[in-house]
Image (cartoon, helix red, strand yellow):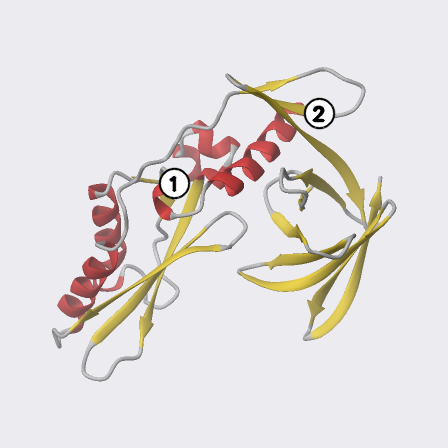
């Protein structure tokens, strides 16, 4: 249980500290981009090559071959995708990088005047990747777990420590993890910590939050509230807004 909590805390810490692609050491490049067929025009292999030139480490398509630190904390890696962009007489594409909560970290575009699709899109991809900075990820501070009656995770640093508390929540059917963030917001994650469900950000109004909801491969903004031990937020269900209520388990 404590190993899971440490991984969850590392995940939230990674999300807080990393703001651009160069903050990430690892990038996951899929075998198929959403805007192209599988490795069409050799774009997937080409992007891996271009990213390696900028010192990024590309994750294997087999998770069993991932570095242990990424297995423990998937939020150390970005996910890459590429889509076609309509452009008259040009081959144009965009490359999107998202984090573990599917938040967009960067989007870069490239345009080629080469008419042949294979050469044109490869040049466009290179021009897009040229806009990325070299990888300059900083190692996360070491994590030490303390045995207490409540579940606390202590982050040890040379200049002191900060505490993040993890609570269990339930909607009556499923159990979730609530991770307190250092800025006063919090994250709702699946019980096993593999997925970010929603991220709550403070607003100027007490107990009212701006919520980034993750649903499959998409995410959207919503509104959340806190009333005592009850947390509620609005979600889209078949294009209809519904309220989700979570209480302390």
Locate the C terminus and report the quarter of the image it occupies: top right
Near-viewer residue (8 or 40): 8
Quadrant where the N terminus sits is: top right
- Numbered label attached to residue 23: 1
Alpha-carbon distance for marks 2 and 1? 27 Å
> Label 1's element?
helix
Q: Position of residue 36 (x, y in %)?
A: 32, 67
Task: Please report whichever mark, 2 or 1, sits nearer to the chain's N-terminal start.
Answer: 1
Residue 96: x and y in percent read: 38, 59
Which residue is outermost to the front?
204
Residue at 74 percent across and 58 percent down: it is 224
Q: Is residue 243 left or right of residue 83?
A: right
Residue visible at 87% across and 46% down in the picture: 228
In the rendered image, the vertical position of residue 14 relative to residue 115, given as above or below: above
Quadrant for residue 167, please give it.
top right
Task: Give residue 188's position: percent from left, percent from top.
Answer: 68, 46
**139 relative to 50, above or below:** above
Across and down, in percent, residue 206 comes to 78, 53
On the image, numbered disc 2 is attached to which residue?
152
Q: What kind of element bears circle 2?
A: strand
Residue at screen point 71% across, 64% down: 235
In the rendered structure, the answer to whether residue 21 lies left or right of residue 171 reads left
Relative vertical location of residue 53 with respect to residue 141 in this rendering, above or below: below
Q: Residue 168 got which mark?
A: none
Q: Is residue 86 above or below residue 139?
A: below
Mark 2 vs 1: CB contact within 8 A:
no
Q: Quadrant of residue 90?
A: bottom left
Quarter of the image where one finds residue 244:
bottom right
Q: Is residue 28 left or right of residue 227?
A: left
Q: Residues within 10 Å of mark 1 (few under 14, many from 20)?
A: many
List the single residue furthest toward the bottom. 88
């Amino acid at each position: 249980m404590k190993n899971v909590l440490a991984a969850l805390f590392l995940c939230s810490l990674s999300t807080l500290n990393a703001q651009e692609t160069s903050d990430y050491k690892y990038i996951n490049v899929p075998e198929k981009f959403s805007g192209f067929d599988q490795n069409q025009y050799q774009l997937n292999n080409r992007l891996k090559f271009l990213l390696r030139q900028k010192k990024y480490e590309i994750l294997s398509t087999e998770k069993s071959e991932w570095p242990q630190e990424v297995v423990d904390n998937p939020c150390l890696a970005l996910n890459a995708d590429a889509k076609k962009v309509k452009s008259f007489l040009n081959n144009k594409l965009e490359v999107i990088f998202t984090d573990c909560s599917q938040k967009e970290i960067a989007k870069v575009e490239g345009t080629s005047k080469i008419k042949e699709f294979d050469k044109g899109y490869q040049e466009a991809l290179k021009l897009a990747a040229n806009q990325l900075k070299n990888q300059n990820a900083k190692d996360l501070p070491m994590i030490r777990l303390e045995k207490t009656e409540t579940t606390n995770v202590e982050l040890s640093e040379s200049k002191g420590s900060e505490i993040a508390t993890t609570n269990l929540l339930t909607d009556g059917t499923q159990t979730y993890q609530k991770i307190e963030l250092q800025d006063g917001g919090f994250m709702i994650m699946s019980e096993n910590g593999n997925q970010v469900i929603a991220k709550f950000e403070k607003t100027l109004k007490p107990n009212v939050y701006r919520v980034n909801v993750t649903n499959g491969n998409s995410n959207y903004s919503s509104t959340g509230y806190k009333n005592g031990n009850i947390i509620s937020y609005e979600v889209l269900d078949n294009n209809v807004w519904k309220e989700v209520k979570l209480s302390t388990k």
